Image (tube, rainbow, N blue to C red):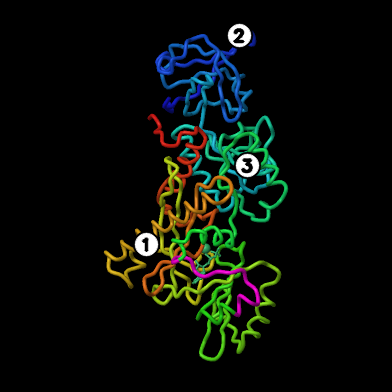
Amino acid sequence: MVASLISVSIVPIELSEKEDVSIYLSSRILKKWNIKTNTVIHLKIGQKTREALIKSAEVPSTELQIPDRFLMEFAMPTYSGKYLIKYSSQSRTITVGRFIGLLTDLQIDEENEPDFRSVHAFCEELHHGISGRGGFFSVFSLQDLSNEFIKGYYFKDGKWVLGELPIPSVIYNRIHSRKLEYQDLFLQFYEQVVSMDIPFFNHRFLSKWEVYSLLIKEEYMHPYIPKTKIFSKESLREFINKYDTVFVKPIHGSQGRSIIKIKKEEDYFSIQSSVMPASDNSVKKDTIEAVLQHLKKILHNRIYIIQQGIPLADYQSRPMDFRVLCHKNVQNLWEVTSLIARISGEKQFVSNIAQGGEIMKPLSALSAFFNKENSLDVISLMKELSVEASSILSSHSAGITGELGVDIGIDINGKLWLIEVNSKPSKNFEDHGLKIRPSAKAIINFGTSLAFNTFLEKEEQ
Ligand SMILES: Nc1ncnc2c1ncn2[C@@H]1O[C@H](COP(=O)(O)OP(=O)(O)O)[C@@H](O)[C@H]1O
Ligand SMILES: [Mg+2]
């Protein structure tokens, strides 16, 4: 059976205590689904299922009428809203959706409006995108899930309101803190979500070493991956002897923080850190031993990778690379949602925006090196490489992955290099002029396919 989604408004109706719980749909929909009026069906809202009598009524074919006290059992805020419904004749269940939830780290505060930090504006877009075409969006933290409902925020009349809400049918993980994802609280939440059969994406932060180890398993990716090892005395000696430039990066780092570049000069080594404000903060050391002593002081006890430095193509003498945002589409295949160039700040050697980098259209950024035709070829190759890397990572890592941000460098000879892949990519690179960014649409589509389990199927409009 091809399950189709129908767009309806849920209209709460009043019902006296004595009456049976009946829900009403138009005879057109009942006929389409082959449901007899006055029979018992299951109604699933969020993760909760209840029995109800279904009746056909002289209601518009765009309405699903549900008694308000019945809606309360589902922890539904009792206002009419647009939803999508699907019927399974096998289980005799009408599923109302899509309930998409976003998990992040926040303190519930009854008094004030919440702050979802780097995803605050994105959450508003997700709300508009979901409610506009049918569904309900909520934001919550690890503490907020019970067996009956989730305590979280939903967007109403222009602000985020706290409520006891339906448990979502799919959860998008945007926890900001890597540490939090290693704590019991996260593991317990994840176990609970799995036991409730709720799809959960993206599973968690990936470390730089995990990304490298997974990608390197595929032989055909080798030409695109800079040589990488876990940092140690031995690997430092080996890399400094082999390469003109070496990068040292924390495996759990992000936003270009705490990155060290070591460059071999004629008769000394220069060591530079990605500090802000950017400056020529380089330190000179004569021997590898002296480099090691210096690094010991600044690396502390964190785990680092050491990586072959790539002589990145530059834009007006500022090194650049590219951020390719990828999502899984409704066919469960990876595709590119956006691609931009990032130009490092003055005197900086990392291109991250947090360290003074600027974004630019890829064609303009490439224009100093390539003519338009070659630039277009390079861009298609970057897209292919990103889709390939995303497929490998998502199929080899635990849990569900629906979104990845791939950093690609291009060297002065025009060769592409995969610098890293992020499982919690920033959304700040897209066009802010748009009401709903392409990545918000991509997340909604992927979430919807997971919620209704309808990959490959099209929504009925
Ligand atoms: N091996 C390398 N060669 C040249 N530049 C690099 C290399 N590794 C990192 N960089 C520069 O540093 C930036 C940040 O590195 P990245 O590995 O993406 O860490 P982060 O997680 O902090 O973004 C890259 O976007 C790039 O500009
Ligand atoms: Mg990066």
In the image, what residue type sits under mark 1?
Lys
Task: Read off the magenta span.
Answer: 223-237
Q: Which comes before the other along the chain, label 2 or label 1? A: 2
Q: Which comes before the other along the chain, label 3 or label 1? A: 3
Residue 87, image x and y in percent? 48, 23
Residue 139, image x and y in percent? 59, 41
Residue at 40% x, 48% y: name it: 434
Disc 3 and disc 1: Cα gap in Å? 35 Å
Seen from this angle, which residue lies furthest right? 184
Residue 18, image x and y in percent? 64, 8
In the image, what residue type sits under mark 2?
Glu
In the image, what residue type sits under mark 3?
Phe
Camera-nearest residue between 322 and 79 = 322
Residue 356, image x and y in percent? 50, 68
Disc 2 and disc 1: Cα gap in Å? 62 Å
Q: Left or right: 413 with respect to 191?
A: left
Secondary structure beneath dot 2 equals loop
Which residue carries the number 1 mark?
361
**Residue 190 within the magenta-colored segment of the rendering:** no
Which residue carries the number 3 mark?
140
Q: Which comes before the other along the chain, label 2 or label 3? A: 2
> Label for residue 351?
none
Residue at 46% x, 32% y: name it: 134
> Label for residue 19?
2
